[in-house]
Image: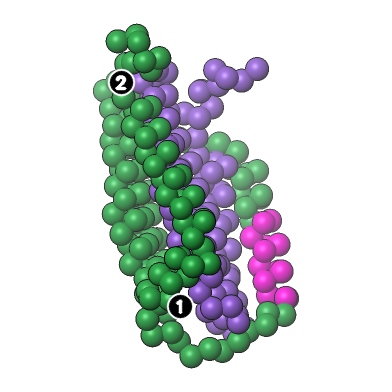
Chain colours: A green, B purple
Amino acid sequence: MSRSLTHSVFALLFTFFGVAGLYVFLSADFLAGVQLLIYVGGILVLLLFGLMLTNRITTVKISQGRVNRFVGGLASLGIFLIIGYVMLTSHWNVVNKPPAEDTIEAIGTALMTNWLLPFEVASLLLLAALMGAAMMARRGDMGGESE
Amino acid sequence: MNHLEVYLIIGAILFSLGLFAVITRRNAIAVLMGIELILNSANLNFVAFAKYSSVNLDGHVFAIFVIIMAAAEVAVALAIVLNIYNNLNTINVDDASTLRG
């Protein structure tokens, strides 16, 4: 939570790398790769892009302040304590499986059999989101005829 | 404390920090970064439960869907943020209150 948003973005980069490392420890090699490709390569670049497009220092002072610090800290700390208490006191039915060697083939099979309909819906969602983002991000002709 | 709970606690920490960022930051891009943290913590829990429970890879598939949704969400949200910046010359989420009744 540094004052400079660019520093925050780079801290988020290291957080994503750390989560990818945790995926490797959880023997989810495909997900670790996807995490690096999409989060680091896509989302983070997009965030930096938006940050630099809206951060013209001469025209507008970018607001980096924080509000509601007490309420926000209290709420997030309370939720963390509740979640942590539940997680530590629940009896998880832990099964110790041998680590999967290669998850890519199993994930591909699952996506094409059990999860085929959500897969297609996700592709439609991506198409609609990208078309909508391209429409909205164009300057000027928001109504389509006010050019 | 076994290994599963370590991952769950890390996920809870990530979730709380993301929630703190969403509540306290007023810059729209910082709020988006907090949302990414929250989604990452959910993904971490999915993958941890997929490893330490008897279901096999459904958690991985669900995490992939969450990542897809996060990518779509951040693309649309950044387009909205750029539009707000072009129209109102600010990206403070408290100033963009035109639609408030």
- Of the numbered discs 2 and 1, the one sitting upstream in the chain is 1
Res. A48 in view? yes
- Residue A6 coordinates in the image, percent (x, y): 32, 44
Chain of the residue displaying label 1: A
For the residue pair B14 and A102, the one nearer the viewer reads as A102
- Examine the rendered structure and indicate whether residue B38 appears above or below residue B23: below
Start-end of magenta stretch: A78-90
- Residue B38 coordinates in the image, percent (x, y): 53, 54
Q: Which mark is residue A139?
A: 2
Residue underneath mark 1: A26
- Residue B91 coordinates in the image, percent (x, y): 42, 28
For the residue pair A19 and A36, the one nearer the viewer reads as A36
Are labels 2 and 1 on one chain?
A: yes
- The three-letter amino acid code for the residue at tag 1 is Leu
Chain of the residue displaying label 2: A
**A136 with respect to A86 (left or right):** left
